[in-house]
Amino acid sequence: MNHCLALKKNGVMQPRGGFQAVPDILLKQQGAMGLSATDLVVLLNILMYWWYVEQKPYPRPTTIAKRMDVNVRTVQRSLQRMEELGLIVRSKTPEGSPIIDPTPLVARLTKAVQSDRDFVFRQQNKAVVGSSDKLQVDDF
């Protein structure tokens, strides 16, 4: 691995260029939620820009299309499909800047994870004293 692109953490090489954790439940529910492989990659590109809950992202469709090596219309259709599925909401800030709100996706995943057998197993076998039974985003 190129050392200028990685750093060592706990003895293991880690990427420096940034990364995002993908909830298991998103991958498990991809088909049930109606997401195509293209939709999932577009969604991951959106989530890459969502650093703070209150600041909704807006990566340009042209930027996503270039990364994916697809036509911008492919990305636009994917965004429209995800909006129709109720997974994202496209709107504008009071200043008129476009944003994509992925909180409906989070709500859907939060509900789905409650019946996920792996999640239920982890919850039943938590050994942490004083841990909350309340579902947290960090739990999935």
Image: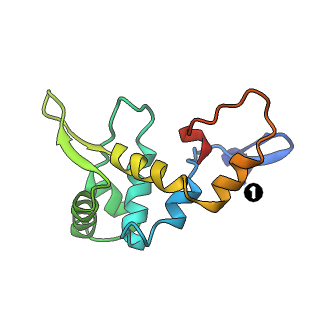
Residue 88: x and y, percent? Answer: 29, 51
> Residue 5 or 22: which is nearer the viewer?
22
Q: Residue at x 76, y 42 (%)?
A: 126
The answer to whether any part of residue 54 appears in the image is yes
Residue 39 vertical placement versus 63 (above, below): below
The answer to whether any part of residue 67 appears in the image is no
Q: What amino acid does circle 1 point to?
A: Met
**Residue 64, picture quadrant:** bottom left
Residue 57 vertical placement versus 46 (above, below): above
Q: Residue at x 18, y 42 (%)?
A: 91
Q: Find disc 1 in the rendering and name its residue.
A: 1
Residue 62: x and y, percent? Answer: 27, 57
**Residue 132, picture quadrant:** top right
> Residue 137 or 115: which is nearer the viewer?
115
Task: Find the residue positioned furthest to the right.
Answer: 11
Residue 111: x and y, percent? Answer: 46, 51
